[in-house]
Image (tube, rainbow, N blue to C red):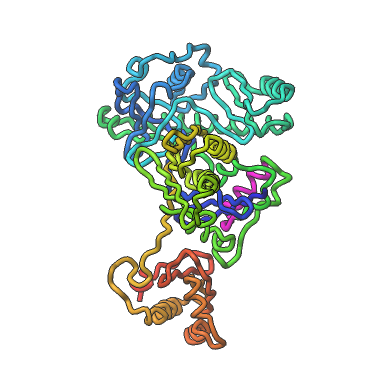
Amino acid sequence: MTSEVIVDVHPQAVSIALLEDKRLVEYQHEGRDARFSVGNIYLARVKKIMPGLNACFVNVGYEHDAFLHYLDLGFHFRSLDKYLNLIGPGKKVPITKVGKTEDLEKDGSVLNTLTQWQEVLVQIQKEPISTKGPRVSCDISFPGRLLVLVPFSDKISVSTKIRNGKERNRLKQLMQSICPKGFGVIVRTVAEGKRASDLDKELTILLRRWEETIENVRAARKYAAENPAKNKQIELQNYKPTLCFEETSRAVVLLRDLFNPSYESIYINDEKVYNEIKDYISLIAPEQAHIVKHYTGKVPIFDNFSVTKQIKSNFGRIVTFKHGAYLIIEHTEALHVVDVNSGNRAKNADNQEENALEVNLGAADELSRQLRLRDMGGIIVVDFIDMNQPENRQKLYERMVENMKSDRARHNILPLSKFGLMQITRQRVRPVEEPIVAEECPTCGGSGKIRPSLLFTDIVESKVALLAQQKYRKIRLHLHPFVAAYISQGFLSLLKKWQFRHRIRISLIPNQQLSFLQYQFYNEKGEELDMREANEMK
């Protein structure tokens, strides 16, 4: 199986698609101004303690305060808290200065551990979902591709997926010899067979991230000392948390967890992000650096690799799969519900059980893909078509377990219940991906008022004339593929007439993401032109 990564970068958002044998299996879309990525570390304050929940709420600058449970403080919380107290404005303190401290008790109370307005260093574990704020932890860690660095720990752990005893011992002894005092390390599965120089290089990078985090804590303390508030209570209530460590760009984070030798290509349509990814791949796998490619085609990158079409066909309430069968996927606050339907398949009384098994196996294949594609987490309940034979029910369960082996998220699958329901739990760290695939009415644009469609080309030409008056000589015009074909048809097409009439060069680009009567103008640099501003200037 071959894999390709397509990265679509826009001024407002970044979209990443993972294709396996040209088939879309993972999709992530994130706004460029999104701040709460998993892994970010904040210097924040405890805002409210909830003894009944054995938890507290922490102000990390989000609309809803972050949730911190006692068990998420981590065994090394006392060491972290002591270290934070030692750090002064601009004062450097080695981690070994903390000394030996007792681990936090499992059955302790948050009331006896934290106080209101106490300053804590927290790391985002789950992004804000629905009306809930982020979930945070004081068990700080810095994940890399080969290693995970854990401050205030002296334990070296090796992934259980590395089964070879000699290799486990080699990795453990190697890390014990190079890991500095006061830090622990978790060796990830992909580190199997790696050279000592590769592990040492990544450990150095992770240690540098820790030092940068603590440097940001010192800077925040220094600023607070130099700008004391007149009223301490008002200062605490208006406290602004400090972002001490920010995860690298979403594209790099995804590649860090997903990258494998089967990747044929990584295409990026933005030069800056291309350089970031190129540098990262050159660092972790120099021999694979050539697969990172800068896409410079005129056609939108997702359209060129048929990603747009797959997004529109694979998201939404109803998802079809082979032989006319389909899934109905509903999302609620508590869980996700999936119903399997055979659709218009021909059924005979003699082989009804066989038909049900075939549809259910196909549904299991598609559902495992949909869970990754939409990043569905929490509880998923699937209503398969009823089957009477126990061996068929077991076959369906084994098929689902096998399909989910390629899923990186932690999950648990239960066999079918007596009602034919399968229950799945899957790690939930961010909201489910649900891109809007339904288009607005191409005639009214969702307003309910119809604009004469015959005048559409006249409207577009008026915008072209306006841009020509603004001294633009080269522009790119994005239109729906059907409209683009109409405008460019014939020897003396409308497009050529516009260019001659207004003395402007127009690159016509069919864009599948646009509705029929929608258009977008871009300048030579690829920046979108706001035609509302152009109208005002006129």
Is residue 280 within the magenta segment?
Answer: yes
The one nearer the camera, 479 or 520, is 479
Q: Nearer the viewer, residue 465 or 161?
A: 161
Give the answer, above or below, for where 493 lies relative to 108.
Answer: below
Please determine whether, in this image, residue 2 is positioned above or below residue 235: below
Quadrant housing residue 56:
top left
The quarter of the rendered structure image containing the C terminus is bottom left
- Above or below, 480 against 249 in this view is below
Q: Could you say where residue 62 lies in the image, as x and y percent from the top left?
A: 35, 39
Query: On the picture, is 138 further left or further right than 161?
Result: left
Residue at the image point whose x is 42% and y is 46% from the top: 339
Asked where in the image residue 81 lies, by quadrant, the reply is top left
Left or right relative to 448: residue 221: right
Q: In this rendered view, identify the residue nearer to me: 205 or 6.
A: 6
Which residue shows up at 62% across the image and 36% down it? 145
Q: Answer yes or no: is residue 425 visible.
A: no
Compared to 496, does 371 lie above or below? above
Report the span colored magenta: 268-283
Question: Left of 173 or right of it: where is 500?
Answer: left
55 falls in the magenta region? no
Magenta segment's dominant SS is helix
Identified at 50% across, 56% down, the residue is 345
Image check: 485 left or right of 47?
right
Where residue 260 sits: x, y (%)? 66, 42
Residue found 44% across the figure and 24% down from its top: 88
Image mark count: 0
